[in-house]
Amino acid sequence: MEQITHVIATMPAKTEIERRNRALVAFTLLTGARDSAIASMKLKHVDLSAGCVHQDAREVKTKNSKTLTTYFFPVGKEIHGIVAEWVNYLREEKLWGNDDPLFPATRIVVGATRQFEVSGLERKHWSSASPIRTIFREAFQLASLPYYNPHSFRNTLAGLGEVVCKTPEAFKAWSQNFGHEKVMTTFTSYGAVAGQRQGEIIRGLANPQPTATPGMDDAWEELLMRLRKSGVGMKG
């Protein structure tokens, strides 16, 4: 999380292209959406008042053509503010409507020198997610950090969920926000604990633990039982 927020903080935001790029990285962290879905999203899919994104598979390129509603992850007011500012810019200053792209393509024109030049935003979607990955690569390079692709943000969010979710129900909701029907998918696909954090957890278990919330033990036991039945983590 610290690396990603640092990247976003170092991204310039003077031109509308720069503002789009910064909002794009912030939006990926805020929603955990896949890059192919982001490339095809329209303004109408973002509901700032409800704090969510409606990924309608009829228009958004979601995995397995699955429709889902993703609520904004709690990743900080600054990240939320960057995204809200971008949406409002498109709606209020550029006067774009519901069916216009959330992250429009770059307009390329032939300049006075007969060379191709960047000239603001094109009122159309990117044809693929490739430009998104290019924006990410350049942003991490600018921040002097190794490149992490958009999909890796889902790993970061899964790790955050393991820290902030205090009940199985909370983690289940967190998992559904990724579009996962089963919480085990989140555990097995994105749930690896970083080595440093692993050490912190194990050392912390040597200290007296606070009294659990009533019903917590039963709830976690039920989750563990489901994991055992599925065979997750029971071999080796």
Image (cartoon, grey):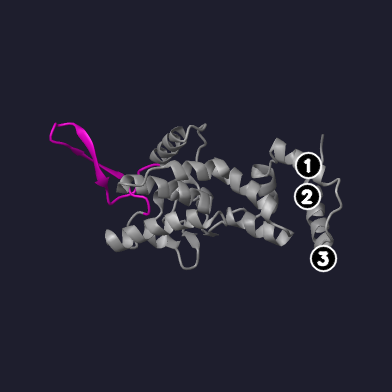
Of pointers 2 and 3, the one earlier in the residue sequence: 3
Disc ID at residue 215: 3
Few, some or many C-alpha atoms within 10 Å of disc 1 (few <14, some 14-19, many ≥20)?
A: few
Task: Give the secondary structure at mark 2.
Answer: helix
The picture places residue 194, in percent across and down from the top left corner, at 69, 38
Q: Is residue 108 magenta?
A: yes
Task: Give the secondary structure at mark 1.
Answer: loop
Looking at numbered disc 2 in the image, what kind of residue is underneath it?
Answer: Leu
Of pointers 2 and 1, the one earlier in the residue sequence: 2
Q: Quadrant of residue 153?
A: top right
Q: In this orientation, which residue lies closer to the viewer: 69 or 146? A: 146
Looking at numbered disc 1 in the image, what kind of residue is underneath it?
Answer: Gly
Disc ID at residue 227: 2
Q: Quadrant of residue 138?
A: top left
Task: Give the secondary structure at mark 3.
Answer: loop
Asked whether the beta carbons under mark 2 and mark 1 sit within 8 Å of each other, the answer is yes
Looking at numbered disc 3 in the image, what kind of residue is underneath it?
Answer: Gly
- The span shown in magenta is 102-128
